[in-house]
Image (spheres, grey):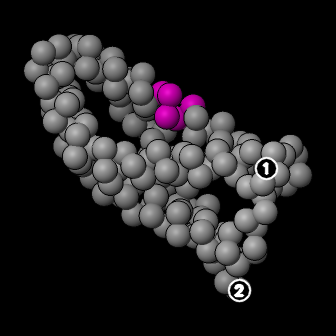
Amino acid sequence: MDDLVIARLLHVLGVVLWIGGVGFVTTSLLPAMGRGRPAVQDLAVFHRLERGFARQARVTVSLTGMSGLYLLWRLDLWWRFADPSFWWMHAMVAIWLLFTAMLFVIEPLFLDRWFARRVERDPERALSTMRRLHWGLLAASLITIAAAVAGSHGGL
């Protein structure tokens, strides 16, 4: 197995674990919240579960970024960023940057405290906001994955 196979393997596995986790949280965990229990209770449980996922997501987002950068360098694919037909490359980088910023900067430095204040004021609305944000992130991620798979196989 050569270095390119290993890099692609790590890249795809990283995306699967990272976006798969976002998919689980968005489509299973968040919809189960607020069904017969106070939102404050559900949000406390969610926060504990999400901490574990955040650790895993930090590792897989980092792995995805490093393997993607390696593939860009090793295959000398920088030129794709100048070609509009490879727009999906920009989308991959944008999604990666968004999640990296969320996991390493925004969430720990700002979002956790901001969200805790919102939960204190209006837990139902905070839960609703969280659901909408997760659906937006998941939709953008899935569109990007679909475009990247199609684009990398000549489908776009």
Q: Quadrant of residue 38?
A: top left
Which mark is drawn over residue 63? none
Judge left or right: residue 2 versus residue 114.
Answer: right
Left or right position of 7 against 83: left
In this picture, is 9 found above or below 93? below
Query: To which residue does mark 1 refer?
Result: 86
- Farthest residue to the right: give it: 154
**Quick one: 91 or 35, which is closer to the camera?**
91
- As drawn, the residue found furthest toward the bottom would be 2
Visible residue check, residue 151: no
Q: Nearer the viewer, residue 134 or 31?
A: 134
Q: Which residues are magenta?
A: 135-139
User: Can you give x and y, in whole percent of width and height, for residue 70 in the image?
Assistant: 62, 74
Res 129 quadrant in image: top left
Circle 2 packing at 10 Å, graded few (<14), some (14-19), many (20+), is few
**Could you tell me which residue is drawn at 58 percent across and 35 percent down?**
140
At 18% from the left and 17% from the top, the residue drawn is 123
Which residue position is annotated with label 2? 2
Q: Amino acid at mark 2?
A: Asp
